[in-house]
Image (tube, grey):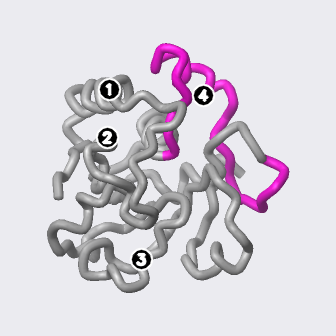
Amino acid sequence: MKSDLVQYLNNKRIALLGNAKSILETEKDFSNYQIVIRMNDSNPKGKEKYIGDKTNILVLSTPLSKETIKEFNAKYVFWATPKNRSKIEYDFCYDLKDWEKLFNTLRGNRPSTGCMIFDYLINHIDFESLDLFGFDFWETPTWYTGDIRTGPHNQDFEKAYINKEIEKNRRIKINHG
């Protein structure tokens, strides 16, 4: 099944939408992206002029009800975290070996959902382009909860990791606002 996801994402223009409130600062048009990836409970209803309404892949690290997941109308559900894997129906799952490697890269800090899907994309997908939106490393709260919750995550290590990968790959860019 993993090869299905790779085939689906290879050679595509991908928008990866993080959950930072800063994503709501400017209007955006995602129609040029073949794939839009959202995370957790980031339902776009009422925010479409900032974050569009298309969801090809929904990446989860917290269980959502089947009804909530259906509202996204996503082609695929990707479960990111090692926890609660039996509590949700998903199409694909972040490999535990990849999680351990990323955990070690982040110096023993648990990676966020955004960092996990970013890591998956850069290590398994030959995308045409990968544009990140709503990644400000907890400078603003999560737009749908209002919380700034780094929890077990380390924003400095995640920022350093993502920026290092962006420097190595011109097909990746981070969009502010």
Q: Residue furthest bottom?
A: 46
| 2 vs 4, front mark | 2
The magenta stretch spans residue 32? no
The disc at residue 98 is 4
Q: Which residues are magenta?
A: 85-113
Cα separation, mark 2 vs mark 4, equals 21 Å
| Label 3 – label 1 distance at C-alpha | 28 Å
Residue 137's disc number: 2
Q: Mark 4: which amino acid?
A: Asp
Question: What element does badge 2 sit on?
Answer: loop
Residue position for label 1: 156
Cβ atoms at labels 1 and 2 below 8 Å apart: yes
User: Could you tell which of marks 2 and 3 lies nearer the N-terminus?
Assistant: 3
Label placed on residue 44 = 3
Q: Is 108 above or below relative to 62?
A: above
Q: Amino acid at mark 2?
A: Phe
- Mark 4 or mark 3: name the one nearer the start of the chain: 3
Residue at position x 77%, y 46% from top? 84
Query: Which percent across, then down, holds residue 75?
Result: 59, 71
Q: Nearer the viewer, mark 1 or mark 4?
A: 1
